[in-house]
Structure formats: C-alpha cells, structure tokens
Image: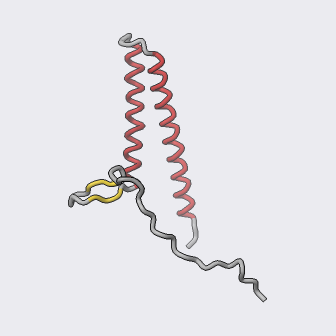
Amino acid sequence: MINTTFITPLTGMPEMKTIGTGTGNLRTNIEGTEKEKTFGDTLRENIQNVKDLENKSLDSAYAVSMGQTEDIEGAMIDATKASIAIETAVQITTRAVNAYKEIVQMQI
C-alpha cells in the first residue's frame, strides 16, 4: 500500500502585482501606452549608472591631480564607489552567464 499523505497536488502560482505607483516600473512605447520595463532596460540603466560613477571618479581624480581642488577624500570616495560598482557588475555578469549555461545544458 502506498502512503499518499506526503503527495500534494501541483497548483498554479497566483499572479504577482506590481508594488508602488508604477512610474518607476513602466515605460512608454511607440504607441504611447505604458508597459513594464524589461530586464534589458534595467540592465542598460544600471550599466549606465556604473559608467557615470566611473566618469565622476575620473573627473575627481583629474581635478585633484591638476590642483583644481583639494578634496582628496571626495576623490577617494568617488573611486571607491566606482570600484564597487564595477566589481558588482562583473559578478552579476558572471552569475548571469553561468545561469544561462546551466539552462542551456538542461535536458528537456
């Protein structure tokens, strides 16, 4: 005799709702209607943020080296922010590539 008390039927997941006002999670498409941001859009925004941090760091370092400012602490903080952002982007990229490889290797 088979014990079926541990077997639970599979049910579908309930639909997830967007939290918040939606202005940050929506974008306007060509027809003028709003739709949710895609993963690619979010990735592009975050990569642009990393580039902006790096440029700010370079500008701060240039200003200190040329004697335009004496805010060495600010330049070091900007450099640290840029470094952490770049490290995070590299780790996320590596994990995404590894996840993709695992998905590709799955047998159907």
The quadrant in which the C terminus is found is: bottom right
Residue occupying the point 51% across, 52% down: 96
Q: Residue furthest bottom?
A: 1
Q: Quadrant of residue 105?
A: bottom right
Q: Quadrant of residue 19?
A: bottom left
Q: Position of residue 71 (x, y in %)?
A: 43, 15
Q: Position of residue 6 (x, y in %)?
A: 71, 77
Q: How is the image coloured?
A: secondary structure
Left or right for 65, reference 92: left
Residue occupying the point 54% across, 58% down: 101
Front residue of 4/94: it is 4
Total number of numbered discs in the rendering? 0
Left or right for 104, reference 60: right
Q: Quadrant of residue 65?
A: top left
As drawn, 10 above or below 104 = below
As drawn, 103 above or below 73 = below
Residue occupying the point 55% across, 56% down: 99
The quadrant in which the N terminus is found is: bottom right
Q: Residue furthest right?
A: 1
Residue occupying the point 39% across, 18% down: 62
As drawn, 92 above or below 11 = above
Q: Position of residue 26 (x, y in %)?
A: 33, 54
As drawn, 35 above or below 8 = above
Q: Position of residue 15 (x, y in %)?
A: 45, 68
